[in-house]
Amino acid sequence: MLRRGRLVALPTETVYGLAARALDPSSVARIFAAKGRPTHHPLIVHVLDEDGARALAASWPARASALAQAFWPGPLTLVVERAPRLDAAVAGGGDSIALRAPSHAVARAVIEALGEPVAAPSANRYQGLSPTTAAHVVKELGAAADLVLDAGPCHAGIESTVVDVRGATARVLRPGAISSAALRAVVPELDAGAAAVASSAPRASPGMGLRHYAPRAQLHLAASVEAARSQSAELAAGGTRVGLVVREASKQTTGGSIVVRVLPADAEGYARALYGALHELDDAGVGAIVVHEAPAEEAWWAVADRLRRASQRE
Ligand code: TXA
Ligand code: MG
């Protein structure tokens, strides 16, 4: 199907992706159309290994090699100069390109069988919640995906970490499944993007508006469990069906029209479960979701980033 220019949703270790032939402009155009994604928003191209990535890069800094050797195959995306053989449309019209070698056996088998790189954004509509199961993909994209490969839930459950390796220091553009601490062990002079995480400024990645990763229900962030509880009670009292998301070990709230989801207390476990919980709450038809915000620790930055973006209004 990929050879015929079709779109195939496939599992990766982070989230499900919507794949098409990266070297074929009309396949790439179909991805943007299926997602309703603005054409200036660049795609990640998936390859098998560092050699595959180098073939798509106009230059490959030593830092890219060091990071690829440490984290590939795996949930790290490297932004480098785009090779001319890659159409600018894949890159949202820019002269850089985001590349990653996924570790998921199914994603790898597809790239290997095709014998070409695939462009694959998360398999959701523009600004929507990323899918961590095949059922999420079907719900979000319906017939817009020509084929969905189901390999069960994704392991990381949150997107890859995007690192720009073109400048004098490596810079995190999107915090993700690989922590800044792990990256720093390989590239000590890392700009972890703290400013972007702490503020509500749009991310450095091109085409990345502030609202993103959002469920259909309005998401509210609360600074403490107590605040989350009282905010959900208030919304529920006003007649809204409410979802409440807290971390394990916080005392249980039950009852009424509040649907509670308790997520793991560790950052990795929480990331794995978060999108699934938000999908479930959307499916349950809640009108609002109140989430106890992530701890202000670096290990939680990827989760904090997604929650903050999900809470933005249009
Ligand atoms: O885990 C993942 O990365 C998943 C799976 C399917 O691989 N893919 C994914 O793709 O999340 P997408 O398109 O939903 O998000 C791509 C991210 C965006 O934040 C985008 O701005 C950034 O990567 N990005 C892509 N190309 C870029 C470029 N040339 N320069 C800077 N940022 C780029
Ligand atoms: Mg996405």
Image (spheres, rainbow, N blue to C red):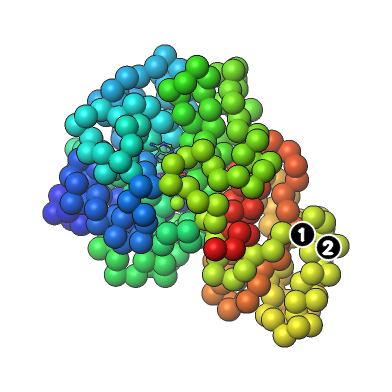
Answer yes or no: do the residues labelled 1 and 2 have beta carbons within 8 Å? yes
Say which quadrant the C terminus sits in. bottom right
Q: Would you call the spot at circle 2 few (<14 residues within 10 Å), some (14-19), or many (20 or more)? A: some
Pointer 1 or 2: first along the chain? 1
Pick whichever, 314 or 104, lies toward us: 314
Q: Between residues 304 and 280, which one lies in front from this camera angle?
A: 304
Label 1, label 2: how many angstroms apart (C-alpha)? Answer: 6 Å
Where residue 196 appears, as percent x and y from the top left, is 62, 39
In the rendered image, the residue lying farthest to the bottom is: 239
Q: Position of residue 5 (x, y in %)?
A: 17, 53
Q: Tag on residue 227?
A: 2
Query: On screen, 170 above or below 15?
Result: above
Say left or right for 18 vs 166. left
How would you rate the neighbour count of disc 1 (Cα within 10 Å): few for under 14, some for 14-19, many for 20 or more?
some
The residue that disc 1 covers is: 222
Is 290 situated left or right of 209 in this image? right
Question: Looking at this rendering, what residue extends furthest in the left direction?
Answer: 4
Q: Quadrant of residue 238?
A: bottom right
On screen, residue 151 above or below 290: above
What numbered label is drawn on residue 127?
A: none
- Where residue 283 sits in the image (x, y, percent)? 54, 74
Residue 187 drawn at (x, y percent): 55, 18
| Mark 2 vs ligand 2: CB below 8 Å | no
Give the residue displayed 25% in from the left and 63% down from the top: 146
At 75% from the left and 77% from the top, the residue drawn is 235
Of all residues, the one furthest to the top in this rendering is 62
Q: Is residue 259 left or right of residue 141?
A: right
Q: Amino acid at mark 2?
A: Ala
User: Label 1's element?
Assistant: strand
